[in-house]
Amino acid sequence: MTMFIRMAQAGKRIVLGGLLVAFGTTSTLHAEQAFKIYGKPYTVEDLAKENQGQFFDIETKKYELISNLARDRYLDEYFVKLAEKDKVSVEKAKNDFIQSKTKVSDGEVKESMEKFKDYPQLKDRSDADKKKMILDYLQKTKAQEVFEGIIAEGIAKKTLEVNYPEPKEPVYKVAVVDTDPVKYGPNAKDTKPLGCTGNACAITIIEYSEFQCPFCERVQPAAKRIMKEYQGKIRWIVRDFPLGFHDRARPAA
C-alpha cells in the first residue's frame, strides 16, 4: 500500500495511507449550472463539494497547464525583446544567449565521464561517443538552468505573473475515537501521552495499513524517525485496512 505523509499545522490531522488521501478543494468555482435532473438544477459548485478530490485534480491540471503556457510564452517574449535590443533575428538572439551561458569546460566533461562511466547507455560506447553524449547532456542541463533563471527573474520583477488561482487542497475531517490505538513516541510501549494528549497534539497521523503489505513494513523506520523528532507534539493512530488481494490480511486484522 502506497503511503503518504503530509505535515499539518497545530490541531490539524494527517491521514497516512494508500486509499484515503484526504485533501483537495478546487480554486474559485463559479455557481454556473451544470445540469438538471427532473427539473432540479445542480451547479458546478455543488458537484465540487461532493467530489472534492476529483475536482482538485482537474483544477491542479488546469493550473499546471496555464502556468507552463505562461512560462513558455514568457520565454518567447523574452527572446523577442532581446532580438529587438540587439537588432538580430529571434533565433540568433536565442542561440547566442544560450551558447554564452552554457559553455562546458573539459574538466566538467571529464568529471561527468568518470561519474557516469558505468551508466548502461555509455558502457559499450567509444570514448568519442561518450564525450559527445556527456557534452550534450551538460549543455542541455545548463540550458534548462538558464531558462529557469529567466523565469525566476521574471517572477521576482513581476514581468511574469500567473493570475489564475492555484487550487487549495481541502482537508477532510477524520474523526478520532477513544478505541483507536494511539502511540505518542517511537516505541511500541509509548501508548501514554508524552508531552501532549488527544486533540492537544499539534500533529495527528492516521495510518491505514495491513499486516501483509510490504510497503507498510518498509515505512516503519521513517515512522519511528518522525515520532522521535516530533515527540511531545504528535500522536500516531493505526487503523487496519486489509486489501482484498492479500489472503492473510483480513484474518490478521
Image: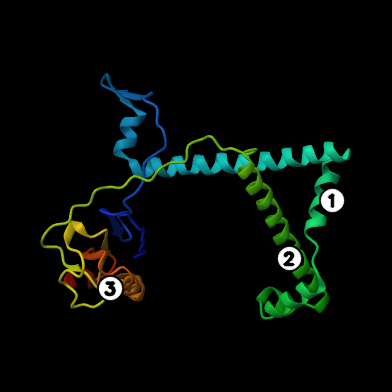
Image-quadrant location for residue 144 = bottom right
Q: Amino acid at mark 1?
A: Asp
Helix, strand or loop at mark 2: helix
Location of mark 1 (residue): 96
In this image, 200 relative to 143: left or right? left
Task: Give the residue at x 80% y 47%.
Answer: 94
In this view of the protein, which residue sits in the foreground, 214 or 237?
A: 237
Question: Does residue 193 appear in this view?
Answer: yes
Task: Give the residue at x 77% y 42%.
Answer: 79
Viewer-nearest of discs 2 and 1? 1
Instruction: Where is residue 233? Give x, y as percent.
Output: 26, 64
Viewer-nearest of discs 3 and 2? 2
State the separation of the CA atoms marked 3 and 1.
Answer: 58 Å
Location of mark 2 (residue): 138
Mark 2, residues whose alpha carbon is within 10 Å: few (<14), some, or many (≥20)? some
Q: Amino acid at mark 3?
A: Gln
Question: Which label number is shown at residue 212?
Answer: 3
In this image, 164 relative to 233: left or right? right
In this image, 178 relative to 123: left or right? left
Task: Give the residue at x 28% y 54%.
Answer: 10
